[in-house]
Image: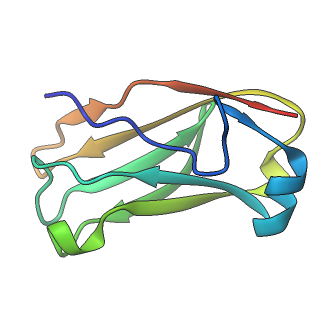
Amino acid sequence: MALPDLTLPQATDNVIQSADIALVRGVAVSIPYNVDIRKGDVIHLWWNTRLIAAKIIIYQEQEFPVVFLVPDELISIGQYSVRYETVDHARNIVSSNVVTVTIE
């Protein structure tokens, strides 16, 4: 099962300007709806090797897209790997493709 790709609404060609980060005090990461997600599944957002946030799904279709905000204090100029994963009731983990974003 492949997860849909995450999106970075502030990015243009996977580049985000520091001024855009300052406007919202972080980087927004949008997770699209996944037809395989079920009530009680958990979505984890990873920024490089750091777990940023987790969300338990309660109302499948109504909660998407899920938008996380990576706080600006974790961001400086450079490149970052961003991905998310889902964990189901049986603790099966499925990871998304990694997106590399550059902060300028």
User: Residue 20 at x, y = what percent?
Assistant: 81, 55
Residue at x 81%, y 44% (from the top left corner): 75
Vertical comparison of 82 with 29: above or below:
above
The reply, left or right, for residue 103 in relation to residue 100 is right
The reply, left or right, for residue 99 in relation to residue 23 is left
- Given residues 91 and 48, the one toward you in this image is 48
User: Residue 26 at x, y = what percent?
Assistant: 74, 58
- Could you say which quadrant of the image residue 91 lies in? top left
User: Residue 58 at x, y = what percent?
Assistant: 20, 74
Residue at x 17%, y 64% (from the top left corner): 40
Residue at x 10%, y 46% (from the top left corner): 36
Colouring scheme, one of rainbow, by chain, secondary structure, one colour: rainbow
Vertical comparison of 27 with 7: above or below:
below
- Could you say which quadrant of the image residue 65 lies in? bottom left
The reply, left or right, for residue 101 in relation to residue 87 is right
- Given residues 12 and 50, the one toward you in this image is 12
Work out which quarter of the rendered image holds the C terminus and state it: top right
- Going by the picture, which residue comes out furthest to the front? 12
The reply, left or right, for residue 92 in relation to residue 51 is left
Residue at x 67%, y 37% (from the top left corner): 12
